[in-house]
Image: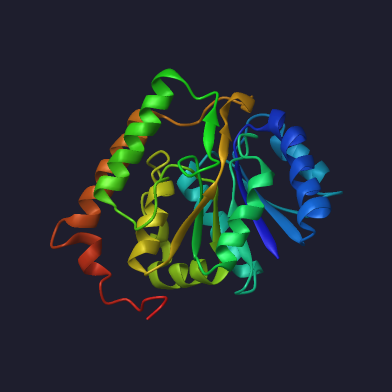
Amino acid sequence: MIYILLPAYNEEVSFELMFPKIDSFFKDVAKIDYHMIVCNDGSTDTSLALLEEYKKTLPITILNHRINRGLGETIRDLFELAAQMSNDDDIFIRMDCDDTHEPQYIQGMIDKIHEGNDVVVASRFVPGGGQEGLVGFRKFLSMMANRFMKFFFPIKGLREYSSGFRAYRADVIKTAIKVYGNNFIQLKGIGFTCTLEKMVKLKHLGAKFGESPFVLKYDQKISESKMVASITTLGYMILVILNYWPFGGWRSQYKNIKKLHS
């Protein structure tokens, strides 16, 4: 079973574009059973009502935050519910809910999981990858963020750090939740920091990382961007401090944890 995890905040205009593509990919192309878990994070538009309608015809479980809690808490809740619903050999695919992540790239991620990786990142920076519609200041921010993350949090073979489009083995997420508890995603209220924090925590567990090609379709984005660059940058700085200091930071704190592949 493939579980698609989707954080949604005011995405009413994106559902009608994204859901049919996801359903068509799994039914007509991959021919694999799938289930979507969507967390409506306090949307003020008609997102929740639309999700209830889609639930009548598509395999969807809805999580609902009555108020907007931010990406960190939303992702935490999605992963915790998926861990409860899934078997160990299932796969989680985390996608953005704004139609910038095309389902056609899911197959490459699944293949990489089957090759023995625990986490597979859909990457713009491998042959066959790229980006469309990301220009100017946002393109610069993305480039600098990836360089920053690669410098402070080097992960062997990984070039794409900021993409939230990823595949995870269900059992590695279950292990992470068991080991870290509520601190699996510790910086819940600081922008998109959770996207990097999960990688750092899984690295400390000894997870194996891989990449597969992906073209970011930013020109397909209809809904407004939820990312506040200044807050997310602050979050990255805090992650550096927590990982290295004081007294060795997370690296020291988690050095004796049971490794996934020990």
Residue 186: image location, x then y, percent: 37, 55
Asked if 97 appears above or below 60 in the picture, the reply is: above
Q: Quadrant of the N terminus?
A: bottom right
Task: Depth check: give the residue in front, 111 or 256.
Answer: 111
| Residue situated furthest bottom in the rendering | 262
| Residue situated furthest left in the rendering | 247
Asked if 176 appears above or below 216 in the picture, the reply is: below
Task: Depth check: give the residue in front, 128 or 32.
Answer: 128
Q: Residue at x 74, y 33 (%)?
A: 17
Say left or right for 22 vs 149: right
| Residue situated furthest front in the rendering | 127
Asked if 245 appears above or below 131 in the picture, the reply is: below
Task: Depth check: give the residue in front, 255 or 78.
Answer: 255
Whether residue 63 is visible? no
Numbered marks: total: 0
Say left or right for 144 vs 134: left
Q: Quadrant of the C terminus?
A: bottom left
| Residue situated furthest top in the rendering | 136
Q: Quadrant of residue 32?
A: bottom right
Residue 12: image location, x then y, percent: 70, 31
Residue 125: image location, x then y, percent: 45, 41
Task: Depth check: give the residue in front, 211 or 24.
Answer: 211
Q: Residue at x 41, y 61 (%)?
A: 184
Residue 243: image location, x then y, percent: 24, 56
Q: Residue at x 63, y 30 (%)?
A: 44
Q: Residue at x 54, y 72 (%)?
A: 171
Say left or right for 53 vs 201: right
Whether residue 240 is visible? yes
